[in-house]
Image: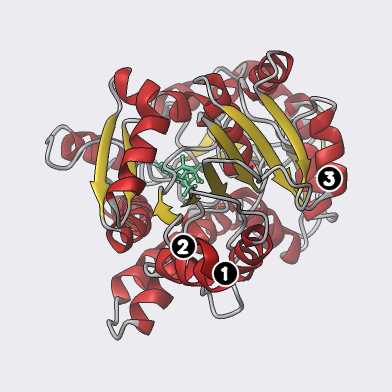
Amino acid sequence: MQVVVVGTGHVGLITAVTLSAVGHDVVGLDDDEEKIGALQQGVCPFFEPGLQGLLEQMMNAGRLRFDLEGSGAVKGAEVIFFCVGTPPRASGEASLVFLERAARSIAFSLSGPTVVVEKSTVPAGTAERLLRVLRFERPDLVDEIEVVSNPEFLREGQAVEDALHPDRILVGARSPRGFETMRRLFEPLIRDGSRLIETDMPTAELAKHASNAFLALKISFANALARLCERAGADVTAVVDVMGSDPRIGRAFLDAGLGYGGFCFPKDLQAFERLAARLGYDFPLLREVERINGEAVEATVDKVKDALWNLEDKRIALLGLAFKPNTDDVRFSPALALARRLLEEGATVVGFDPWAGANAKSELPGLEVASTADDAMEGAHCMVVCTDWDDFRSLDLRRARGLLAHPIVVDGRNVFDPDTMKAEGFVYYGTGRATHRSPH
Ligand code: UGA
């Protein structure tokens, strides 16, 4: 099928590359000339495991190309994906201005039956508005234009794998043609075992917000338990293992730590709460999830202070700067929130991340960024694990102890075993377990 993807951010690019990988002819569009220039040279603008290779392969096979918006590539496309950003407004509400702009500009190039797919995470009711705008701009094509909601569930760092083997594909549509077109589009994935769920449009839109909010709620529940376990002398990792062994609860997304970050959960939670308020339903549970998430960074600052007393004249090493492993993304990263707080307290903060160092530096210039974990740890009075990269789990502990000025470790992601750390001579502060307290 002829497919156009508008927006070459994370979701847009993954969508374009993976749809071409399952056999469609895809054109990726963006209004950013520099980005399109790089993509036309086969250069992926961000890191995502497996993406660069697949992008080159699809471009060489002639099934994937990139162009500027307004280039006319839309003509003749059967399916047009809208993957434009929906950044938060100051109120927390999702801004849909890029979506409306894309709709109005693309409307003029439509020439026949087209299914416009809303991929961006949006408040319930947006697809209906999109349809209205498109039909208003093209009254001659009222019966030809369909809008479909197809929310994305992929995770950064595993996005290619998630897009090629999704556990569910959600399609919200309002007409048999919308459903039928999407069934044909996703046929290779459905044939491979992915489950297709078909609903109306507002249900699909709301299900996406509900899924992210529920995952964030699980994380905040685990983090609140961690605070409690620290007071009760219990171990949160064991508590959530017990809970998670009940299949009604499930073990996933119950890892206590520095909290959730990234460009999805924090903004989607707020947007969902704003949507609920606009619809006349107060949903304070969502605000509580956010509040508990914020506490996780503060609890870690408290542990660093417990260990070091005053933070002026202290050098603190942060291992991990990305919001989670296997990505170079630092947007709303809890590691950077922690770095900011430690800098405010007067500490020197030196961070290391396998991939996200450069992004972290440009986001937070006051942070020193080391090019190896050893360089970050050398002479530091305390080391804090902020992101659960596998590399940190297998850190040479004896070597780390030799490099640190004081053998103090605050484990913000519970990557180390408390007994091993003790045996290796560290003062070890876990999260929700085996937390050392200085005698006052
Ligand atoms: C999330 C969802 O998992 C995807 O399904 C969704 O498609 C995506 O948002 C989106 O809306 O675009 P992502 O933001 O890539 O994906 O990251 P996650 O793997 O969900 O992790 C989010 C944050 O939660 C990270 O900071 C991670 O460290 C943290 N986390 C995760 C925990 O603190 N504990 C856990 O147990 C799990």
Of callouts 3 and 1, the N-terminal one: 1
Tag 2 and tag 1, C-beta contact below 8 Å: yes
Report which residue position mark 1 lands on. Answer: 96
Of callouts 3 and 2, the N-terminal one: 2
Instruction: Say which residue appears at 42% left-offset and 60% top-offset.
Output: 143
Q: Is mark 2 within 8 Å of ligand 1?
A: no
Element at label 2? loop
Tag 3 and tag 1, C-beta contact below 8 Å: no
Cα–Cα gap, marks 3 and 2: 37 Å
Q: Nearer the viewer, residue 158 or 134?
A: 134
Element at label 1? loop
Between circles 3 and 2, the one closer to the viewer is 2
Report which residue position mark 3 lands on. Answer: 368
- Among the 4 quarters of the image, the one containing residue 243: top left
Instruction: Say which residue appears at 27% left-offset and 48% top-offset.
Output: 176
Residue type indicated by callout 1? Leu
Asked if residue 414 is positioned above or below residue 191 in the image, the reply reads below
Instruction: Say which residue appears at 68% left-offset and 22% top-offset.
Output: 55
Relative to 1, 364 lies left or right: right
Q: Residues within 10 Å of mark 3 (few under 14, many from 20)?
A: some
Which mark is on residue 122? Answer: 2
Q: Nearer the viewer, residue 177 or 355?
A: 177
In the rendering, at what x and y percent does residue 6 appear?
64, 48
In the rendering, at what x and y percent does residue 239 appear?
22, 40
Instruction: Say which residue appears at 29% left-offset and 76% top-offset.
Output: 283
Cα–Cα gap, marks 3 and 1: 36 Å
Q: Residues within 10 Å of mark 1 (few under 14, many from 20)?
A: some
Residue type indicated by callout 2? Val
Relative to 172, 328 lies left or right: right
Cα–Cα gap, marks 2 and 1: 8 Å
- Among the 4 quarters of the image, the one containing residue 244: top left
